[in-house]
Image (cartoon, helix red, strand yellow):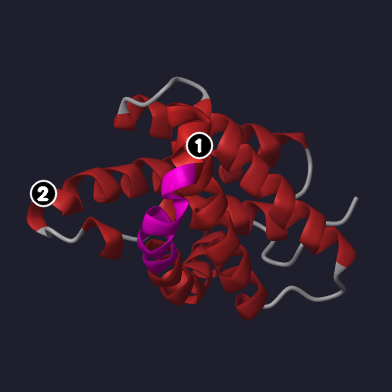
């Protein structure tokens, strides 16, 4: 219950930041994808049915806020969670660097996947023009990811949640 409440509040705040900041700051590429960072943290540190449902709900909330195709971000954020879960279950130790790399890959998957599904395979012809923009947002997200992971660790300790990966 505490995990659900914490990530629901953080996802709501993240979506507010991601939708409001572009109005104040004209360079959208420099706004990190905070939902992907939350999904990667869930995948690295929390395993089970509830974290998968939380990742899906965060993606679905992104769809509701962004007005895109309903279910698209829900699927993509769940895929990012599953990637982080897979990496976490195969490694003995997951560090902030591994998390940052997963955030970079996750942002590329989420943004390119959204464009590919929304506009079909015609987007493949313009991939060379889109990739620098996606890579810049992924880099910004990966750079701030360790700070967000640290904040999440502090909030989890504050609420009594486990910080280390939960193994089943």
To which residue does mark 2 refer? Answer: 23
Front position in the image: 8 or 61: 61
Q: Is residue 43 above or below residue 150?
A: above
Q: Could you say which quadrant of the image residue 65 lies in?
A: top left
Q: Earlier in the sequence, mark 2 or mark 1?
A: 2
Q: Residue at x 18, y 61 (%)?
A: 27
Q: Are marks 2 and 1 in contact (CB under 8 Å)?
A: no
The boundaries of the magenta stretch are: 125-136
Give the distance between the C-alpha atoms of the residues marked 2 and 1, in whole angstroms. Answer: 26 Å
**Disc number placed over residue 116 in the picture, else none:** 1
Q: Residue at x 79, y 62 (%)?
A: 88
Q: Could you say which quadrant of the image residue 84 lies in?
A: bottom right
Q: Residue at x 66, y 42 (%)?
A: 79
SS of the residue under disc 2? helix
Decide if residue 160 is in sight here.
Answer: no
Q: Is residue 138 left or right of residue 14?
A: right
x then y, percent, for residue 119: 43, 29
Confirm whether the magenta stretch covers residue 134.
yes
Q: Quadrant of the N terminus?
A: top right
Confirm whether the magenta stretch covers residue 75.
no
x then y, percent, for residue 29: 28, 60
């Amino acid at each position: 219950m505490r995990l659900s409440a914490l990530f629901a509040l953080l996802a709501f705040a993240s979506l507010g930041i991601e939708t409001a900041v572009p109005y104040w700051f004209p360079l959208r590429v420099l706004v990190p994808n905070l939902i992907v960072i939350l999904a990667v943290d869930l995948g690295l540190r929390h395993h089970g049915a509830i974290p998968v449902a939380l990742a899906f709900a965060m993606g679905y909330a992104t769809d509701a806020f962004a007005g895109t195709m309903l279910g698209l971000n829900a699927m993509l954020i769940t895929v990012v969670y599953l990637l982080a879960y897979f990496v976490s279950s195969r490694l003995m130790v997951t560090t902030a660097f591994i998390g940052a790399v997963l955030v970079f890959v996750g942002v590329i998957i989420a943004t390119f996947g959204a464009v590919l599904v929304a506009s079909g395979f015609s987007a493949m012809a313009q991939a060379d023009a889109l990739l620098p923009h996606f890579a810049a947002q992924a880099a910004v997200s990966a750079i701030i990811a360790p700070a967000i992971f640290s904040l999440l660790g502090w909030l989890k300790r504050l609420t009594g949640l486990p910080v280390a990966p939960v193994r089943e």
